Image (cartoon, rainbow, N blue to C red):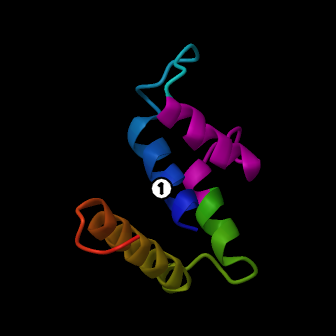
Amino acid sequence: MTELINAVANYWKHNYEWTHDDTSARRERTLESLEALELVSQSYHLVEILSKLVEPEPLLFRNLVPYLEEWRDEVMKASKVCSGLEPQ
C-alpha cells in the first residue's frame, strides 16, 4: 500500500517534468507501479487509483482514511529507521 501511495504522489508531483526519454529510477519505479494497475493510460490517474483502493465501496474520503493512515505509519517508521532512531 505504501509503495502505491508513494507512486501516486510521485506521479502527481513529477509527471509534468518527465519526458519520454527520461530513464530516471524514480520515473521507472513510479510508472511500473502504476502500470501494474493498468492506470497509466487513464485520463484521471489519481482518481482511478483512489477508486480502486476502496472498491467496492464508494469513493468517499472516509473510505480512504485507513489506507492513508497505514501509509503515514509506514513513512514515519521508514523515517525513524533512516535516521537511526529505530532498528530495522
Residue 27 in percent (x, y) is at 52, 33
Magenta region: 25-47
Which of the two residues, 3 or 65, is positioned nearer the viewer here?
A: 3
Q: Is residue 84 left or right of residue 35?
A: left
Measured along the vertical axis of the image, is residue 19 above or below residue 46? above
Type of amino acid at the residue the image marks with label 1 = Asn
- Expressed as whole percent of the image width and height from the top left, the position of residue 79 reads 30, 64
Q: Nearer the viewer, residue 70 or 13?
A: 70
> At which x and y percent is residue 22?
52, 18
- Residue in the picture at 49% in, 25% down: 24
Chief secondary structure of the magenta portion: helix
Q: Which residue is mark 1?
A: 6
Image quarter in which the N terminus is found: bottom right
The secondary structure type at the circle numbered 1 is helix
Q: Residues within 10 Å of mark 1 (few under 14, many from 20)?
A: some
Q: Is residue 45 magenta?
A: yes
Q: Quadrant of the C terminus?
A: bottom left
Q: Which residue lies at the image location 60% right of the left edge and 48% below the top edge? A: 44
